[in-house]
Image (cartoon, helix red, strand yellow):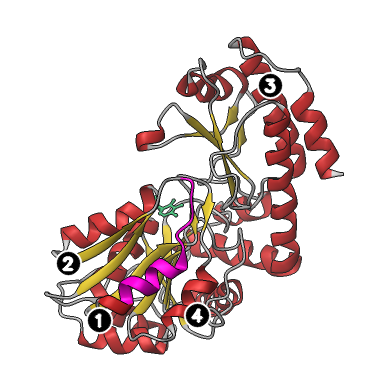
Amino acid sequence: MLKNYLLTPGPTPIPPRVLETMARPIIHHRTPEFQKIIQEVEEDLKYVYQTKNEVLIFAASGTGAMEGSIANLFSPGDKALVVRGGKFGERFGDICKAYGIEFTALDVEWGKAVDPKMIDDVLKKDKKIKAVFTTLCETSTGVSTDVEAIGKIMKNYEAVLVVDAISGLAAIPIKTDEWGIDVAISGSQKGLMIPPGLAFVSVSPKAWQVIEKSTLPKYYFDFKAYKKALGKTDTPFTPAVNLMIALKEALKIIKEEGLDVIFEKHKKMAAAIRSAVKSMGLELFAPEAYSDGVTAVKVPKGIDGEKLVKTMRDKYGVGIAGGQDEMKGKMFRIATMGYITPPDLIVCIATLETVLSEMGYKFQLGSGVVALEEALR
Ligand SMILES: *Cc1c(COP(=O)(O)O)cnc(C)c1O
């Protein structure tokens, strides 16, 4: 029998208080009881997003809200700027392609963050760009983007700023209004600590003006329909009732703990992971622009990275993520967000040491755990 530990950047573990709410009998969604849930969830999501904007909720994975942001902002002939520094930045480009929206790609080497000045340079030259797409925490590379700096630049332009905060929200700081984010996208299974199945977008007044004029085809993800329903404390379609109830509880936990306390905790845990892997002679994939929500580590030469992740999971029950696309087999990633706690990290690093030494990697056994404990003290 294996005891399972999940340290992947989505899905993340779910607190028992949240799990328990999902075992309750289903309720109907067109009721005052459910309306109260919508109200509470909406208010608490605004707290997590640090916004006064409406936050729309979809029964979808995060990508649904990414697609929705493109379908709702554009009309045929419009142009976008897409920052591509990993798998998820690339996804925005892929969705633009699917909708026939032309875009300028700002390709950033994986493991590095975009220089906000480069966005300024493109916007200065190309006045046709209507929206800029970037990623707060690029989960595939463990990179964090300076969205605040990008927001400052965007104040000089008409284009709207769209940020994928699917793994960033509630994991690392995001100040939607203060930073000038027009559309902030998120999902349920990362920092918010509930199962996959909900997607979110906050929409600024400036973005609503653009959405009003959009003529691309849309139906399920028509933001205006969700806004209209929200005005009546309702949803346009059947909501994911039990996930909404789980979200209500998860948001309550986040509020009780406080965002600043949560961010400090993640920062300390991520620093401890970085210190642990470095002590084992391993290299960080993003040594400078690292995110405190997920740490990406290079697999050492001569070690099969896919086998490493698989052995940790299948032999020891410890789930970490491997590399994606071009980094498949060459990277592993450990999340520090949500319901992942310092003792989980000790289990994770100790297991990583065990498996790496089983696989023949030469290092001082225990060095990672010692460094981790020292950093966590
Ligand atoms: C997980 C993730 C996504 C994809 O979300 P799904 O819920 O799998 O659709 C997109 N962007 C980022 C940054 C993510 O971490």
Q: Which residue is mark 3?
A: 353
Q: Which residue is mark 4?
A: 152
Please tell me whether mark 1 or mark 2 is closer to you in this view.
1
User: Which label's residue is closer to the chain start, 3 or 1?
Assistant: 1
**Residue 341 percent location from the top left of the image:** 72, 45
Q: Amino acid at mark 4?
A: Lys
Nearest to the eye among marks 4 and 2: give it.
4
Reply above or below: 223 against 350.
below
Which image quadrant is residue 373 in?
A: top right
Number of the label disc, if any, that sits on residue 101:
2
Cβ of mark 2 under 8 A from ligand 1: no
Which of discs 4 and 3 lies nearer the camera? The answer is: 4
Q: At label 2, which amino acid type do we have?
A: Ile
Depth check, front residue: 334 or 281: 281
Q: Is residue 74 left or right of residue 202?
A: left
Q: Residues within 10 Å of mark 1 (few under 14, many from 20)?
A: few
Q: Is residue 258 magenta?
A: no
The local crowd at label 2, few if under 14, some if 14 to 19, many if 20 or more residues have their Cα within 10 Å, is: many
Q: Earlier in the sequence, mark 1 or mark 2?
A: 2
Disc number for residue 127: 1
What amino acid type should be assigned to the residue bearing mark 1? Lys
Instruction: Write down the quadrant of residue 263 in the picture.
Output: bottom right
Q: Which numbered disc, 3 or 1, marks the residue closer to the eye?
A: 1
Crowding near the residue tagged with mark 4, few <14, some 14–19, many ≥20 C-alpha atoms within 10 Å? some
Q: Where does the magenta region start and end?
A: 111-123
Residue type at tag 3: Glu
> Tag 3: Cα neighbours inside 10 Å, few (<14), some, or many (≥20)?
many
Q: CA distance from mark 4 to mark 3?
A: 43 Å
Label 2 and label 3: CA atoms lie apart by 47 Å
> Tags 1 and 4 in contact by the CB under 8 Å rule?
no
Q: Residue 85's spot in the image, x, y percent?
A: 40, 52
The x and y percentages for residue 153 are 45, 79
